[in-house]
């Protein structure tokens, strides 16, 4: 299962119970080592919503207490989620039969002040207790109550002067009152509208903003209030303002279809979700994929939800949305979330047609979305198709599981990996140093590797192996090798963020720089290879020390690793790899000239 922008929502791990040839999911787990702030905080909301409604308990394990770093890798500020995000999990858990909760653990970058503040929120004991309950079919009621209390405590802390300087959300007492109202069979909107009508306005920072959507945002600001926040891209149009809001929208967009206008003018409260959803080039839909589910988790199932899409999606999106919404959902996780969650959609994008403005109601796309057939679930231990994630998996098995103590894994690409930091051992292995807050956009001339390993040999300094993994040979960039090693060398030239002597000890803040002297680096390109010619071709243009081509058998039960050393350093690494004893996995090694 994958988490890419073009696939259905999937989580990091699912525990299942197998009996009599039948497999039943009992717990879904999601882990993120990135700072849980901004849209990073709600990117997993779609997974929480999906699993809770599939009656599968869901836990989102995140780190709390870490700091954002500036361009010089100095600590700048704590990065924390909007309190509405953890609060939405508590509401979701009350409306479904399966608990869905965030569980926060201590961030490696947390200092003493952060640990003191967030210590009562950390939930390692609840994490272990809930896993046990699911494994042994025990009641989760007690653990669920404990987690709900910790969520509320965090929400109150995040909205208080002690925990954050923000003043754009409910006050701590209001959050408590809102949850008490829901516990008494109320809903969030029936509390917020009379008791906490926060002013709301939308600030859009992209250049590709149409004049009409700017006016639409102004109309929403005039008639709407904030959904727990003055700044979240979610607002409420109260039922007594919905008619005036609808008239203003129809005046802004003449000629809207009657079906949409009729829906827009219905009675009842309306919530509007504002999805930018796409980076300026229109090539990345991931940032907002959790926003519609976040809105639905807060408001429940009985309130109308209108999603306004205003970002510069690729032009090819709009014919698919109009004529093949099922295909669009299959290809793009953001659109899957929008169409699965929303009651209506309004498009005002620079890349979309404006005469007439594209609008849709659920009945227009729901009939085109086929519900999955009821089938027995049993996951075969062999992938149906292979790609980059299978390359990543074999690399991890080879270096971390098979190579033994001679290799240290410092950074691992998902699935199941952690990109939140890079670790290296000191040359004498007396300490593990970790650099946190890795930038997503790297400096010119550098590229963050997908994997970083240290290879230790007796009597010599360790070798740093930086690997770029790809689906296919054609995806490997020209000249990628020096960029991989530059990233590592530039990073370790700065002071490590934290350090520890052993994996069982807590992280401590570090000021050591240059503690790994005489670094030797080896760059590697790894990909699914369909021929030796592809391996040779990448060796000619990638400027790496070693090319690794992964050739999987037709039944995907075995793999041949084709190696092409390009330098003396690459030859030494290939000789080391070729000596691995791979009885646990069906893996053969073969060189190509």
Image: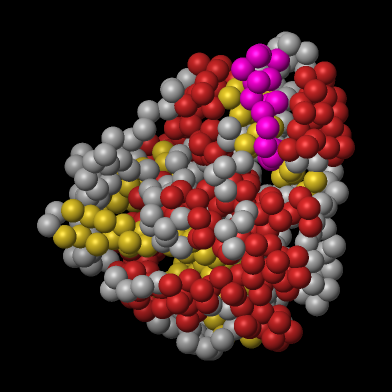
Task: Tell me: 396 left or right of 258.
Answer: left
- Residue 215 seen in this snapshot: yes
Task: Tell me: 391 left or right of 46.
Answer: left
- Residue 418 seen in this snapshot: no
Residue 300 in picture, x, y percent from top left: 57, 48
Task: Tell me: 440 left or right of 247.
Answer: left
Callout count: 0
The residue shown at (79%, 72%) is 160
The residue shown at (53%, 56%) is 92
The quarter of the displayed image where residue 19 is located:
bottom left
Q: Please tell me which residue lies in front, 412 or 568.
A: 412
> Residue 258 lies in magenta, yes or no?
yes
Q: Which residues are magenta?
A: 256-273
> Residue 357 lies in magenta, yes or no?
no
Task: Tell me: 74 left or right of 320.
Answer: right
Q: Please tell me which residue lies in front, 296 or 247.
A: 247
> In which quadrant of the rendered image does the C terminus lie?
top left
Q: Please tell me which residue lies in front, 531 or 243.
A: 243
Residue 190 in picture, x, y percent from top left: 69, 51
Residue 303 in picture, x, y percent from top left: 61, 41
The residue shown at (37%, 69%) is 400
**Residue 426 sits above or below residue 46 on the image:** below
Q: Please tell me which residue lies in front, 503 or 301.
A: 301
**Residue 33 sits above or below residue 529 on the image:** below
């Amino acid at each position: 299962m994958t988490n890419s922008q073009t696939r259905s929502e999937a989580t990091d791990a699912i525990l299942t119970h197998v009996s009599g040839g039948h497999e039943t999911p009992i717990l879904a787990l999601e882990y993120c080592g990135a700072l849980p702030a901004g849209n990073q905080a709600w990117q997993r909301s779609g997974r929480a919503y999906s699993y809770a409604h599939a009656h599968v308990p869901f836990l989102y394990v995140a780190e709390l207490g870490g700091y954002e770093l500036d361009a010089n890798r100095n600590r700048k500020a704590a990065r924390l989620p909007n309190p509405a995000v953890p609060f939405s999990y508590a509401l979701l858990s009350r409306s479904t039969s399966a608990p869905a909760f965030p569980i926060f653990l201590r961030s490696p970058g947390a200092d003493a002040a952060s640990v003191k503040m967030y210590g009562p929120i950390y939930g390692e004991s609840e994490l272990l207790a809930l896993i046990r309950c699911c494994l042994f079919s025990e009641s989760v009621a007690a653990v669920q109550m404990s987690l709900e209390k910790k969520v509320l405590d965090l929400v109150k802390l995040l909205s208080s002067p002690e925990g954050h300087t923000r003043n754009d959300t409910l006050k701590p007492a209001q959050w408590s009152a809102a949850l008490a109202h829901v516990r008494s069979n109320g809903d969030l909107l029936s509390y917020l509208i009379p008791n906490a009508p926060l002013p709301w306005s939308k600030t859009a920072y992209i250049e590709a903003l149409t004049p009409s959507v700017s006016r639409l945002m102004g109309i929403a600001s005039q008639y709407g209030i904030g959904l727990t926040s003055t700044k979240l891209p979610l607002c409420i149009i109260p039922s007594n303002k919905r008619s005036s809001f609808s008239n203003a929208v129809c005046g802004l967009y003449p000629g809207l279809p009657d079906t949409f206008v009729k829906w827009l003018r219905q009675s009842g409260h309306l919530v509007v979700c504002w999805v930018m959803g796409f980076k300026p080039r229109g090539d990345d839909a991931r940032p907002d994929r959790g926003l519609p589910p976040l809105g639905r988790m807060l408001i429940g199932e009985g309130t109308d939800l209108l999603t306004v899409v205003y970002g510069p999606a690729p032009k090819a999106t709009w014919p698919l949305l109009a004529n093949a919404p099922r295909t669009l959902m299959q290809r793009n996780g953001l659109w899957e979330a929008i169409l699965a969650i929303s009651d209506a959609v309004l498009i005002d994008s620079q890349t979309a047609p404006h005469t007439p403005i594209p609008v849709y109601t659920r009945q227009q796309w729901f009939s085109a979305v086929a519900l999955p057939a009821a089938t027995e679930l049993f996951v075969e231990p062999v992938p149906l198709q292979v790609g980059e994630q299978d390359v990543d998996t074999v690399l991890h098995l080879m270096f971390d599981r098979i190579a033994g103590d001679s290799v240290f894994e410092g950074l691992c690409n998902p699935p199941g990996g952690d990109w939140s930091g890079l670790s290296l051992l000191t040359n004498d292995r007396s300490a593990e140093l970790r650099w946190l807050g890795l930038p997503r956009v790297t400096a010119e001339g550098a590229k963050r590797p997908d994997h970083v390993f240290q290879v230790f040999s007796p009597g010599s300094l360790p070798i740093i192996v930086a690997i770029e993994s790809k689906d296919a040979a054609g995806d490997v960039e020209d000249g990628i090798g020096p960029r991989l090693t530059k990233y590592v060398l530039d990073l370790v030239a700065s002071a490590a963020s934290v350090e520890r002597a052993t994996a069982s000890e807590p992280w401590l803040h570090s000021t050591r720089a240059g503690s790994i002297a005489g670094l030797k680096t080896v760059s590697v390109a790894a990909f699914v290879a369909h021929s030796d010619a592809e391996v040779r071709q990448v060796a000619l243009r990638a400027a790496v020390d070693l090319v690794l081509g992964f050739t999987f058998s037709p039944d995907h039960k075995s793999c041949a690793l084709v190696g092409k050393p390009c330098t003396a350093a690459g030859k030494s690494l290939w000789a080391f790899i070729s000596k691995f004893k791979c009885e646990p996995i069906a893996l053969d090694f073969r060189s190509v000239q």
